[in-house]
Amino acid sequence: MRSHQALLVSCEIPWTEKEEFMEDLFREQVRRTLAVGFNNLYIFGTAGEGYAVDTPRFRRIADVFHEETSAEGVLPQVGIIGLSTANILERLSYAYEVGFRAFQISMPSWGALNDNEVLKFFTDVCGAYPDCRFLHYNLPRTKRLLAADDYRRLAAAVPNLVATKNTATNHASTIDLVEGSVGIQHFLGEAMFPFGTLCGECSLLSSYGPAFPSKTKQLFEYAVTGQIEKLFRFHKEYLAVVGDVSAPVLKYARIDGAYDKLWVRLGGLPMPLRLLSPYESLPEKLYDECRRILHEKHPDWVEAG
C-alpha cells in the first residue's frame, strides 16, 4: 500500500457570532483529539468548512494547526477545496510553506471533469509537489465520482496519490474500490468500513470518533486484528447508538459540518454549532435533546461530562 492503514478524524472550526476564528477553542480541540489517541487528523474537509473559508482564515487556521500537530508521531493533513487548479495550488503552496506534506484534495466542482481533465488535474496538482502525499476526497459534490478503473489509471501516472476518502459507497462500489485499485489506501465511513475489511486492507474515516473515541478505536481494532465476528456484532451496536442519538436531527437538511460539530460537542468540547455564511446550522435545542438520549439510553457510551 502507498499509505498506511489508519483511523482518520476531522477537526472542526469554531466561530464566534461574528464569524471570527475561536483560536483557543480550536487548539483545545486538536489537543483533545490527540490526547484520546487519534494521531491521524485533518482540517478543511466538508465538515471542516474548507469550501467556506477565505484566504486569511485559511492561513491562520493552517498556522495554528501546524503548531499543534508538529510533535513526532502526529500525521496531520490539510484539505484543499477550490473551484480551479489555480485556486487549489495557491492554498497548497501556503500550507506547504508552513510545513505540511500531506494533503486532501477534491476535484473542482463547477463542472464535471471528463477523463482527460481528471488526469490533468491530478498530474498538475500532485505533480507540483512530488515530495508530498495526496488523498483524494471522492464525493458527489464534485459531479464526478471516481471508481477503481479511474484510480488504476491515476496510480500509474501519479505516484504520490496514495489514498482516497469515500463515504458514499454501497456494497458493490466498496468491493470495486478495495479489490480493484491495488496499492491505494481507501478511507471508508463507519457504515461501510467493516464490510470493506472483508475485501482487503482499508482504513476508517470516522465522523463519530469525537463523541465516542474509545468505542471508535475498538471498532477499528477489531477490523485490523481480523476479529470479524466481534467486529460485526459491535458494528451493529455502534450504528444503533448513532441512530438513536441522531434521531432528532434527521428531519433537518444541512451541510455536513452542521452534524459534525454536534458530535464534537457531544464529546464534551463546547463547540458552537455555527457555520460560516451562507450555510445554516442546526438549532441549539437539538444538542440538548441528542445529549439527553445519549445519557438516558446509552450511559455506557458517554465518554465526556
Image (spheres, grey):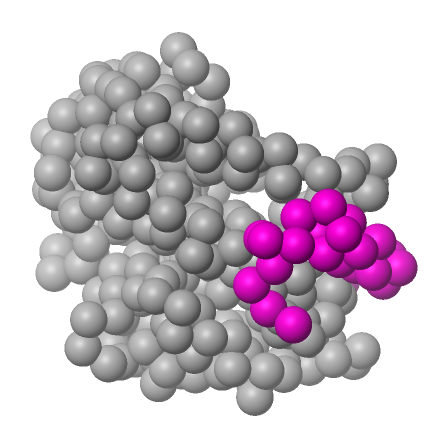
Would residue 92 be visible to someone looking at this image?
A: no
The question of residue 295 being in magenta is answered with yes
Residue 76 higher or lower than 170, as above or below: below
In terms of depth relative to the viewer, which is nearer, 204 or 88?
204
Image check: 63 left or right of 2? right
Image check: 204 left or right of 132? right
- Quadrant assignment, res 181: top left
Residue 209 higher or lower than 150, as above or below: below
Image quadrant in which the C terminus is located: bottom right
Residue 191 higher or lower than 42, as above or below: above
Would residue 201 be visible to someone looking at this image?
A: yes
- Quadrant assignment, res 248: top right
In terms of depth relative to the viewer, which is nearer, 298 or 283?
298
Going 21% across and 45% down the picture, which residue do you hit?
5
The question of residue 244 being in magenta is answered with no
Residue extending furthest bottom? 24
**Part of the protein shown in magenta:** 277-305
Residue 230: give x, y in percent of width and height. 36, 31
- Quadrant assignment, res 21: bottom right
In terms of depth relative to the viewer, which is nearer, 145 or 26?
26
Residue 4: give x, y in percent of width and height. 17, 47
Residue 169 higher or lower than 270, as above or below: above
Residue 166: give x, y in percent of width and height. 41, 34
Q: How many marks are shown on the rendered structure?
A: 0
Residue extending furthest top? 172
Going 11% across and 38% down the picture, which residue do you hit?
1
In terms of depth relative to the viewer, which is nearer, 20 or 129?
20
Residue 244: give x, y in percent of width and height. 72, 38
Image check: 88 left or right of 262? left
Going 20% across and 38% down the picture, which residue do you hit?
225
